[in-house]
């Protein structure tokens, strides 16, 4: 097309342009934008031409002014059954103004604060909503019952809290002219001081521990299932090798074959091991230790840190906070993270050991010179070592129904790194037949040492159990057997370890 043939707007006839303008102003605009639906307002918009602001939704209403093209307005809402909308804006001289304009002469830019999508209703959602309403009132009722039940304890807390708060407010007002901060700090100190008498031993402390236990079992159930799944996937063929029935030649073929399959399953179960390690090493162990450390701050076990002496209790409070709630908590979380990484590469599982409270505190606590060390069992059935059950109920039964040294049976829940495991049903026959109450257990340990096995698993006729070989008590240290918490079967509570449990990696700190 030649340049002279192109359409030039400046050559349009003046009258034709005037008629087009009049037609556009009288008839409905052809290129008008679609009006956003109701329920999506407000919108930000701009005018596309000179436009009257009317006092009402129609041309017969008085004009309040004229917008220039490109003027910005807020579209607040549409007028029902109309193409007019209500707008608002801020005029420089007259301030905020509002009125009505025809939506066909607006360009809608964007929605302002779009509303959240409406939740779809359904039978299941309605059922959960009804259940929540009932539970809410039940929780409120329980709160009222707890307040009425422990009103005396709450009054005992109020007295030291207000006393310490008033003293703190006066002291901080004199020193720093900040009485409110002193009151808050004194209030906290007073509550901690009041809690020391009954949070661990009294009725309120028992209720707190019971609630913690109930919440723990509820939350941990999926992870105990995952832990069992991890143990199962390590050797899914375990159930087929309960008895020593294969010939020696067959076992010599089967053992290396199954060890190769273990490697494949080990790689496939890496995400599962990581999930279990995070939960047990960091979350559960961290929470149980913080609980022990908090109680050590409130009710110290050492006379040097304030046990039985109010003056020393107050004097050593900052030290106990730094020692237990800062230093020990940081070490606990740090070793939890370190062992989580290690457990990904060196398989570990959560296993259970039944014993009495005296032995359990000696093992898990840090008051003895050999704290954190499991003593190898010499009166054993599958070698000299430390025995664990893959199921909690087995350890619970052992702790409760066997004759132990005291009347406080406990179950120690541990993270265990077993190392290289041999199923005794696949061991040579002379090794398998050395098991049992009258067996030659040293022979089993010698076979394990010569063939570089560190743990055995065997079916004792009723259930599976593991023996971590250690006839010299050299390897049953916190880096190999890591206590998470103790459960006391007499009190039906998680057992508080005075001073906290021994650190897995930082045993000397």
Image (spheres, rainbow, N blue to C red):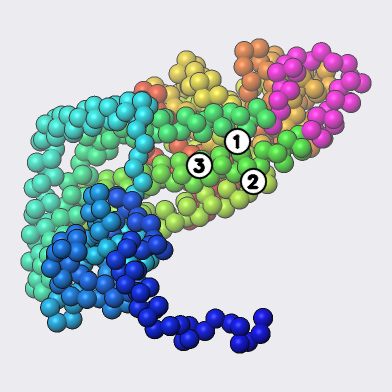
Which residue in the structure is indicated by mark 2?
344
Mark 1: give few (<14), some (14-19) or many (20+) Cα within 10 Å.
Answer: many
Instruction: Give the vertical position of 323 relative to 493 (above or below).
Output: below
Instruction: Give the vertical position of 18 relative to 357 (above or below).
Output: below
In what element is the residue under mark 2?
A: helix
Which residue in the structure is indicated by mark 1?
349
Which residue in the structure is indicated by mark 3?
279
Instruction: Inspect this view and state whether residue 146 appears.
Output: no
Res. 465 image quadrant: top right
Mark 2: give few (<14), some (14-19) or many (20+) Cα within 10 Å.
Answer: many
- Residue found 17% across the figure and 29% down from its top: 141
What is the count of numbered marks? 3
Res. 60 image quadrant: bottom left
Res. 226 image quadrant: top right
Magenta residues, start to end: 234-261
Mark closest to the chain's N terminus, 3 or 2: 3
Cα separation, mark 1 vs mark 3, equals 12 Å
Mark closest to the chain's N terminus, 1 or 3: 3
- Give x and y (percent) for residue 126: 32, 28
- Give x and y (percent) for residue 142: 20, 29
In front here: 204 or 98? 98
Instruction: Give the vertical position of 338 relative to 14 (above or below).
Output: above
- Residue found 43% across the figure and 83% down from its top: 13
- Give x and y (percent) for residue 19: 35, 74
Cα separation, mark 2 vs mark 1, equals 11 Å
In what element is the residue under mark 1?
A: strand
In the rendered structure, the answer to whether residue 151 lies left or right of residue 488 reads left
């Amino acid at each position: 097309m030649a340049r002279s043939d192109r359409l030039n707007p400046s050559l349009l006839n003046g009258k034709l342009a005037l008629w087009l303008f009049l037609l556009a102003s009288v008839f409905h605009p052809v290129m008008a934008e679609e009006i956003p639906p109701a329920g999506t307002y407000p919108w930000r918009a701009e005018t596309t031409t000179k436009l009257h602001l009317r006092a009402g939704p129609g041309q017969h209403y008085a004009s309040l002014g004229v917008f220039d093209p490109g003027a910005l307005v807020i579209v607040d809402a549409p007028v029902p059954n109309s193409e007019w909308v209500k707008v608002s804006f801020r005029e420089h001289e007259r301030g905020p103004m509002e009125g009505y304009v025809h939506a066909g002469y607006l360009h809608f830019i964007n929605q302002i604060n779009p509303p959240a999508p409406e939740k779809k209703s359904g039978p299941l959602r309605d059922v959960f909503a009804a259940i929540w309403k009932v539970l809410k009132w039940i929780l409120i009722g329980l709160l009222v019952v707890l307040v009425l039940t422990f009103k005396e304890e709450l009054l005992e807390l109020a007295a030291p809290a207000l006393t310490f708060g008033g003293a703190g407010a006066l002291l901080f007002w004199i020193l720093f002219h900040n009485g409110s901060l002193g009151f808050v700090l004194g209030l906290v100190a007073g509550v901690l001081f009041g809690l020391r008498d009954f949070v661990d031993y009294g009725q309120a402390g028992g209720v707190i521990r019971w609630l913690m236990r109930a919440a723990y079992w509820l939350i941990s159930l999926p992870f105990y299932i995952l832990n069992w799944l991890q143990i199962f996937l390590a050797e899914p063929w375990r159930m087929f090798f309960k008895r020593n029935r294969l010939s020696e030649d067959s076992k010599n073929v089967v053992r290396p074959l199954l060890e190769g399959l273990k490697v494949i399953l080990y790689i496939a179960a890496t995400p599962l091991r990581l999930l279990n390690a995070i939960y047990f090493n960091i979350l559960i162990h961290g929470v149980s230790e913080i609980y022990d450390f908090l109680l050590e701050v409130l009710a110290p076990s050492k006379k040097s840190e304030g046990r039985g002496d109010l003056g020393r209790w107050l004097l050593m409070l900052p030290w106990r906070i730094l020692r237990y709630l800062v230093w020990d908590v940081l070490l606990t979380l740090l070793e939890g993270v370190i062992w989580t990484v290690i457990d990904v590469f060196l398989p570990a599982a959560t296993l259970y050991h039944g014993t009495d409270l005296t032995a359990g505190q000696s093992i898990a606590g840090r008051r003895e010179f050999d704290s954190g060390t499991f003593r190898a069992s010499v009166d054993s059935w599958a070698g000299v070592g430390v025995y664990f059950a893959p199921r909690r109920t087995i350890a619970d039964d052992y702790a409760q129904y066997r004759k132990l040294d005291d009347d406080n049976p406990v179950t120690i829940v541990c993270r265990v790194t077993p190392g290289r495991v041999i199923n005794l049903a696949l061991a040579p026959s002379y090794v398998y037949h050395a098991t049992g109450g009258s067996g030659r257990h040293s022979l089993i340990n010698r076979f394990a040492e010569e063939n570089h096995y560190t743990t055995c698993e065997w079916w004792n006729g009723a259930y599976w159990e593991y023996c971590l070989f250690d006839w010299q008590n050299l390897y049953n240290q916190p880096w190999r057997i890591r206590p998470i918490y103790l459960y006391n079967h007499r009190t039906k509570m998680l057992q508080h370890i005075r001073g906290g449990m021994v650190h897995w990696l930082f045993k000397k700190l």
